[in-house]
């Protein structure tokens, strides 16, 4: 079974449109990767989401640095983004541009230990950046910093997930440090604003509502735990003082 077929079968099972199922898979995996958990509203898809992740894992392993989710999306969703001014580039064009970008970095800085690259004008589902990453994984650089942005939140999350999976599968020994910074903003008016940050190596900087809420909750629990520990210490000290008296 492939990703597309799995989404369609899941949509029939739950009597929802395939595009809704696909979007829910992407959103829950994004949340899972950023926080290790996801919104309870996706609980009904738990088994199917696990299968989706396994299929994605296999697809990425068999097709390194390829836009497998973008290809599946085009067959699942009725793509009409004219209102956002979007146009999905053909995969061969994205791959070529990605290789050109990577070669530009390598020829100008053959011994550079840190390379910054990406697609901040509208990364779509990440075809260009994936292609560039595949080439730069073979470079001498020890650190790869990737910057992506898209006006469509689902698009940038699809690109992010594919970058994460490719890094995890094709950089297993972490020979390279791969850092991803992702924004959901308008490239024409300025996307690189804190409120547009949907992924960062420091997750507490992420402003996406679910992720932001998760870490605020974690921080609150930690503060309560510290307060509780201090309170218990105070009580123990007070009890010892009373006994001594």
Image (cartoon, rainbow, N blue to C red):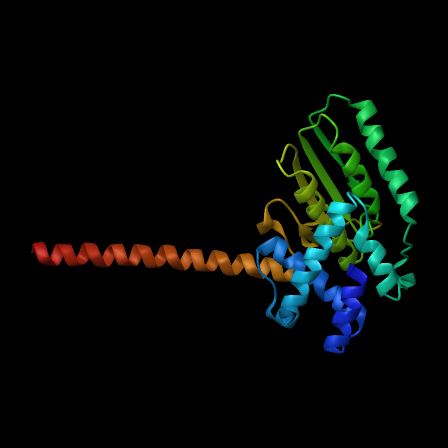
Q: Position of residue 178 (x, y in %)?
A: 67, 38
95 over 239 or under it: above or below: above
To which quarter of the image does residue 144 belong?
top right
Please report the residue visible at 83 percent of the width from the left and 54 percent of the height from the top.
70
To which quarter of the image does residue 71 belong?
bottom right
Q: Position of residue 15 (x, y in %)?
A: 76, 78
Q: Residue at the left extreme?
A: 245
Check the picture and name the quadrant holding the C terminus: bottom left
Please report the residue visible at 80 percent of the width from the left and 52 percent of the height from the top.
68
Q: Residue at the top extreme?
A: 111
244 over 166 or under it: above or below: below
Front residue of 143 and 193: 143
Please report the residue visible at 84 percent of the width from the left and 29 percent of the height from the top.
103
Taking the image as shown, residue 1 lies to the left or right of residue 28, namely right
Q: Position of residue 172 (x, y in %)?
A: 64, 39
Check the picture and name the quadrant holding the N terminus: bottom right
Front residue of 188 and 69: 69
Taking the image as shown, residue 206 lies to the left or right of residue 12, namely left
Residue 81 visible in rendering = yes
Q: Residue at the bottom extreme?
A: 15
- Count of marks placed on residues: 0
Q: Position of residue 128 (x, y in %)?
A: 84, 43
Q: Residue at the front extreme?
A: 1
């Amino acid at each position: 079974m492939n990703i597309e077929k799995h989404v369609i079968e899941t949509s029939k099972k739950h009597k929802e449109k395939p595009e809704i199922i696909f979007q829910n898979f992407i959103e829950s995996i994004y949340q899972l990767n950023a926080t290790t958990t996801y919104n309870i509203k996706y609980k009904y898809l738990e088994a199917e989401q696990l299968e989706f992740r396994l299929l994605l894992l296999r697809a990425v392993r068999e097709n390194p640095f390829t836009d497998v989710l973008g290809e599946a999306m085009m067959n699942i969703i009725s793509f009409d983004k004219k209102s956002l001014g979007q146009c999905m580039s053909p995969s061969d064009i994205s791959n070529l541009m990605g290789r050109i970008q990577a070669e530009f970095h390598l020829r100008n800085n053959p011994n550079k230990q840190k390379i910054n690259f990406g697609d901040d004008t509208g990364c779509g589902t990440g075809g260009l950046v994936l292609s560039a990453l595949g080439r730069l994984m073979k470079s001498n650089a020890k650190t790869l910093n990737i910057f992506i942005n898209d006006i469509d939140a689902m698009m940038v999350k699809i690109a992010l997930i594919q970058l994460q999976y490719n890094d995890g599968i094709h950089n297993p020994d972490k020979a390279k440090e791969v850092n991803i910074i992702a924004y959901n903003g308008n490239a024409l008016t300025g996307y690189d604003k804190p409120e547009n940050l949907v992924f960062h190596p420091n997750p507490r900087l992420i402003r996406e509502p679910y992720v932001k809420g998760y870490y605020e909750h974690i921080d609150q629990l930690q503060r309560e735990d510290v307060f509780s520990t201090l309170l218990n210490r105070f009580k123990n000290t007070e009890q010892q003082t009373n006994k001594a008296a």
